Image: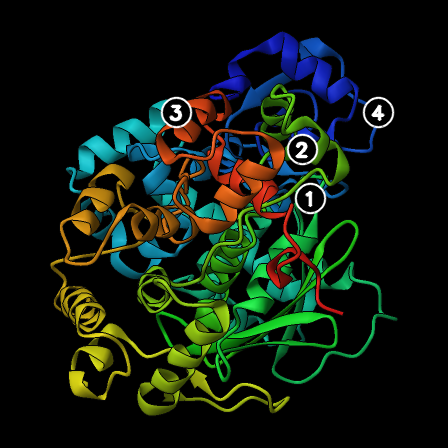
Amino acid sequence: MRNGMHTDMERCVRAVQSKDARFDGWFFTAVLTTRIYCRPSCPVVPPKPENMTFYPSAAACQQAGFRACKRCRPDTSPGSPEWNQRADLVARAMRLIGDGVVDREGVPGLAGRLGYSIRQVERQLLAELGAGPLALARAQRAQTARLLIETTTLPMAEIAFAAGFSSIRTFNDTVREVFALAPSELRDRVPKKRAPATPGVLSLRLPFRAPLNPDNLFGHLAATAVPGVEEWRDGAYRRTLRLPYGHGIVGLTPHVDHIACRLTLSDLRDLPVAISRCRRMLDLDADPVAVDDQLRTDPVLAPLVAKAPGRRVPRTVDEAEFAVRAVLGQQVSTAAARTHAARLVTAHGEPVEDPEGGLTHLFPSPQALAALDPSSLAMPSTRRTTFTTLVRQLADGSLHLGVESDWAEARARLLALPGFGPWTVDVIGMRALGDPDAFLPTDLGIRRAAQELGLPSTPAALTARAAAWRPWRAYAVQYLWATDSHPINFLPV
């Protein structure tokens, strides 16, 4: 863990002088002489150490009066892995800010979701990140604005609105302050010979820290894809998105140094939320070097890591949806779980229009599923009770699963539901809530892998052995699963 790394002057200077891209997003370098801030891997000649100072966030740099570097574009670096590997107040707040809660509900809404006072939230964010929730949300709006300016031909007034600014003047002032260029000047810097954009489609590049192994990541999403909601087409994983202001369709294609992202949105205000959820689903803000360094200390895992480093945990864009799908997948095959989910989508999903024709629905909301006739569910009565209890509690708000969820509290609430055992709770913890240390010792695939590799095969003994893999046991699960020939482990052809 590199929590508070920006306070370690010596390590930060070494990272900047070696242009180490692994540290992009961990901290930002502010240059006192030029008043510009950069990512550690900035290609320009590093400044003298005495002219460097370091900040934990782009927002803190901006608050201190530094402008974003035009060469390395620090505002587009991968997010800090801290926010996806912790469940404390600051991490949960950062996940909510990334999900656009401050723009939609203000700081009171952020504090209310976290269960703390506004003052407590602001104090903790300032202490750790050097910026409060408004400044952090403003930095995100600036990044969204830049993205729209450079990738679309939309009028500036529409971009200002879509990025979450309250007025054109605020939009203009913020862009000038952060990037030292007017919005029109930012657009003028874009090469004129770029490929013409498809009307209504945003084409983006999602960065990540190398290495990234796409096999199990996209293989899992494609193998478990629910017809109508998800598909694998022409080398891309595509799915529909339920978003705060409307809906969207995304196509994600793995490349060596980025993930290509094609987004169609019914409301452009959902752009930052859609990007945040796609990054989270693909685990793009992970620190694979830290994960793999820990796992390869185990002689059994070391060959698996060496063979295919950089495995990510395939997650979700909708925590409630995944919980429902986890129940549908209890004690049945992947194919059967897809069939059950597809029936629900056809009967209760919200129809959407896909310009490319393959996707037809949003996954049904908990409210829609809570209203269905339980007798219509083709499953055993005990699982029917599990399903109806879950969707009822999700619909009425007595159970909430979201980016702000406290992992331990959510686990306890799920375990209290009928039919929820450790496997169901831990797979939701791993893939929906994002707990990097969730572990599945009772999973059939894990037990097979353990037996094949000479690891203890009983859940208690395997859990004891897995203590050495903490806090990255969810990633160890990916390496163990990958020993099998199941389609989830292979990039679709």
Residue at image mark 3: 128
Q: What element carries label 2?
A: loop
Residue at image mark 2: 39
Mark 4 and mark 3 in contact (Cβ < 8 Å)?
no
Instruction: Specify whether 43 is left or right of 219.
Output: right
Q: Earlier in the sequence, mark 3 or mark 4?
A: 4
Q: Earlier in the sequence, mark 1 or mark 3?
A: 1
Q: On screen, 372 above or below 410?
A: below
Distance of label 2 from label 4 (alpha carbons) = 13 Å
Q: Which of marks 4 and 1 is nearer the N terminus?
A: 4
Q: Residue 45 carries which label?
A: 4
Q: Which of marks 1 and 2 is nearer the N terminus?
A: 2
Q: Which amino acid does label 3 sit on?
A: Glu
Mark 1 and mark 4 in contact (Cβ < 8 Å)?
no
Q: On screen, 299 above or below 331?
A: above
Identity of the residue drawn at 73% across and 41% down? 308
Residue 291: percent from left, percent from top: 58, 30
Q: Which mark is residue 273?
A: none
Q: Which amino acid does label 1 sit on?
A: Arg
Distance of label 4 from label 1 (alpha carbons) = 15 Å
Q: Which amino acid does label 4 sit on?
A: Val
Distance of label 3 from label 4 (alpha carbons) = 29 Å
Identity of the residue drawn at 63% across and 63% down? 487
Q: Can residue 491 be seen in this view?
A: yes
Between 210 and 14, the residue placed more toward the observer is 210
Distance of label 1 from label 3 (alpha carbons) = 23 Å
Residue at image mark 1: 73
Instruction: Specify whether 485 is left or right of 307.
Output: left
Crowd around label 2: few <14 · some 14–19 · many ≥20 (10 Å): many
